[in-house]
Image: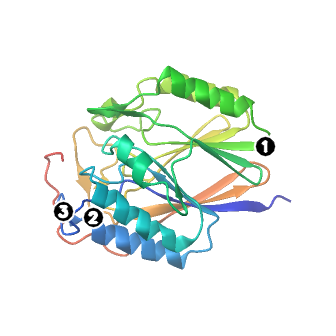
Amino acid sequence: MSDVQLRVAQITDPHLFADTEKRLKGVNTQQTFDAILEQVAQQTPFDLILMTGDLVHDETIEGYQRLCRQMQQFGVPVYCLPGNHDEGRLIGEQLNNGFVHTRRAAHHDDWLFVFLDSSIPGSAAGNLSDDEMLALEERINGNDAQHILVCVHHNPLPVGSTWLDTMTIRNGDSFARLCQHHPKVRGILFGHIHQDYLHQVKDLQLIGSPSTCIQFKVGSHDFSLEALAPGFRILELFDDGRIETQVIRLDTVPEGLELTPEGY
């Protein structure tokens, strides 16, 4: 019988600001982030935390520094990667302190976590450069881990929302095929889509997660928000390579949420 080796929390797309009173589509993103961290604390212990991009919406030093301070409280490794609303240079400078890291890979028990940068400066879409793809393959082939979870910000394949699917990883098909080619790769974990998403492609799990602030409406043609509570994801990683996962949401929809058709 297989056993749980690692218990992992994924926190994604908080869209924080330097000003803690700033709102996104009417939602105070700092308040919802704080509430999610309280929920994470209630669900401990975790072995590590994954933060999959769009961390600081206004790309400010103050936002990243506060985020870094807040994540120290959990006392476990916190791995951060950039999204399309992040400043890559600041992430590297400000999110490498104490328990917070921006490594390219991390090995825990039988599992290897690979962290990719899918951001394109000035674009909401994603792409994995030749260097990123080469680094992924080198880490897969050059590591003795039994199982691999690949973490990235953008969704590699369409999720069924017309407007959102214009902003996938541009070479996502090649990326997904590379991962499928290597049986040790058990899943691709991502943010960006602000919704709960699970899809199985042969033996590969594609896992997308809610934001800690606003939620995108599932299956929408145009930009649309849904009156759902913010959330985060728990993953249990087994020694036989299985991944069991669930989403935990806050009890209420954020106060002030503006369900207007305009983007942000």
Q: Are marks 3 and 1 in contact (CB under 8 Å)?
A: no
Residue under label 1, please give it. 146
List x then y, in percent, for residue 251: 37, 76
Q: Are marks 2 and 3 in contact (CB under 8 Å)?
A: yes
Q: Of callouts 1 and 2, which one flags the residue occurring earlier in the amino acid sequence? A: 2
- Type of amino acid under label 3: Arg
Q: Secondary structure at mark 1?
A: loop
* Residue 237 in the image: above or below residue 88: below
Residue under label 2, please give it. 29
- The residue that appears at 32% across and 74% down in the rendered structure is 252
Residue under label 3, please give it. 23
Which image quadrant is residue 89 in? top left
Q: Give the number of marks.
A: 3
Q: Is residue 97 left or right of residue 63?
A: right
Q: Of callouts 3 and 1, which one flags the residue occurring earlier in the amino acid sequence? A: 3
Q: Are marks 1 and 2 in contact (CB under 8 Å)?
A: no
Q: Label 1 crowding class (10 Å Cα cut-off): few <14, some 14-19, many 20+?
A: some
Look at the image and tell me whether residue 250 can be seen: no
Q: Label 2 crowding class (10 Å Cα cut-off): few <14, some 14-19, many 20+?
A: many
